[in-house]
Amino acid sequence: MASRTTVSGSFFEGNLEQRMVKAVNRGLTDIAIVAQGKVRRQLTPGHGRRTGTLQRSVMGWVYRDLHAKVDAGEKVFGRNLIYSYWVEGVSTLNNRSVFKGYRMFRSVYEWMKRKPKVIEDLFWRAIVEEFN
């Protein structure tokens, strides 16, 4: 006995794998932009912001399929700003300095771990938009 299943509709049109990668990249872009905004909002006068260069350099972006990041200048300048590591608190200079860093990126990472629903909603919206 044999059976046959036929599927149709917009969900099944086109290359499903490419459409899913496009949707995930869109979700990652949305998440990276949210994280970018949260890092930038932490950089205020007296708290990591002097000239505004670091604040303007923080960018969230998808740098290849299925991979996104938020950095401190790589997208803008081709490399992170040299002092961004010190301001974040991950430089070897922080070990011998009184200043231990502001941990802006780490705090956003921790926020994202505590708020998986926000991340899930951003992915869900991107997938729904791609397949509707």
Image (cartoon, rainbow, N blue to C red):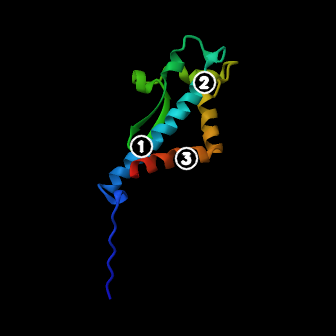
Name the spot of residue 27 as percent of width and height, x first: 47, 43
Query: Which of the numbered marks, if any, corresponds to residue 7?
Result: none
Note whether 44 is above or below 62 in the view shown. above
Name the spot of residue 65 as percent of width and height, x first: 38, 43
Residue at the far bottom in the pictured view: 1
Q: Residues within 10 Å of mark 3 (few under 14, many from 20)?
A: few
* Camera-side residue of 23 and 70: 23
What residue is pinned by disc 3? 121
* Residue 129 visible here: yes
Residue at 33% over, 51% down: 18
* Label 2, label 3: how far apart the Cα atoms are: 22 Å
* Camera-side residue of 55 and 80: 55
Residue at 64% over, 38% down: 111
Residue at 54% over, 14% down: 52
Residue at 59% over, 30% down: 38
Note whether 86 is above or below 20 in the view shown. above
Q: Residues within 10 Å of mark 1 (few under 14, many from 20)?
A: many
* Label 1, label 2: how far apart the Cα atoms are: 24 Å
* Label 1, label 3: how far apart the Cα atoms are: 14 Å
Mark 2: which secondary structure?
Answer: helix
Q: Amino acid at mark 1?
A: Asn
Name the spot of residue 12 as percent of width and height, x first: 34, 60
Query: Which of the numbered marks, if any, corresponds to residue 25?
Result: 1
Mark 3: which secondary structure?
Answer: helix
Q: Amino acid at mark 2?
A: Arg
What residue is pinned by disc 2? 41
Closer to the eye: label 1 or 3: 3
